[in-house]
Image: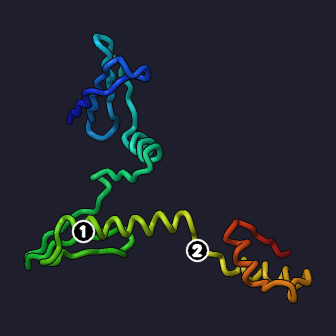
Amino acid sequence: MTTTVPNFYAADRRTPLSLVIQEDGGEHLHIEIHRGDQREQINVDPAVFLDAVGSELGVLAIAKADLPEVKHFADGRVYAETDNGFGDYTLDKKDTPERLIGHARALLALAAHLEAHPPVDEQQVEALTEALIEAGLREKVVPAMVARRLVEFGYRIERA
């Protein structure tokens, strides 16, 4: 498949460019930049390209090849399963593409939140609470609350 992106400009904002992106079956993307009669070509791994674009633009890009298989059953059910068994989904009569994309966006938002805010290690909270109590902070602050915030900020304690 080949995609041409016309009408964008070089850094000088005057020189017109066109971009031709061609997939070779999954191994590489061939990207050609056309500047008048000049052409420059690069080859890039599709996953690396998607990660770079996603990171730079703050978007999630998922290759269709990474989507789970959709299965059709004799009784009319249409089903997709995940690698971990969570989120397995059978189409419902009220489902629409928009509704399913909305569900997917909600799940992706939760995944991004979990990446940014991983669960607190309760053993670390207990260890820091004990250390704060041993340090005599029992009467001035609530040690467990302070310990939880410290763990959330990345502090860890090692006990011998």
Q: Which residue is mark 2?
A: 119
Q: Which mark is residue 143?
A: none
Foreground pick, 46 / 109: 109
Q: Residue furthest bottom?
A: 139
Where residue 3 sits, quadrant-wise, is top left
Secondary structure type for disc 2 = loop
* Residue 61 location (% of width, % of height): 36, 51
Secondary structure type for disc 1 = helix
* Residue 25 location (% of width, % of height): 26, 38
What amino acid type should be assigned to the residue bearing mark 1? Leu
* Residue 30 location (% of width, % of height): 32, 29
- Residue at left 79%, top 78%? 128
Foreground pick, 39 / 102: 102
Q: Which residue is mark 1?
A: 100
Within 10 Å of disc 2 (Cα), the crowding (few <14, some 14-19, many 20+) is few
Q: How is the image coloured?
A: rainbow
- Residue at left 82%, top 84%? 141
- Looking at marks 1 and 2 on the same chain, the residue that comes earlier in the sequence is marked by 1
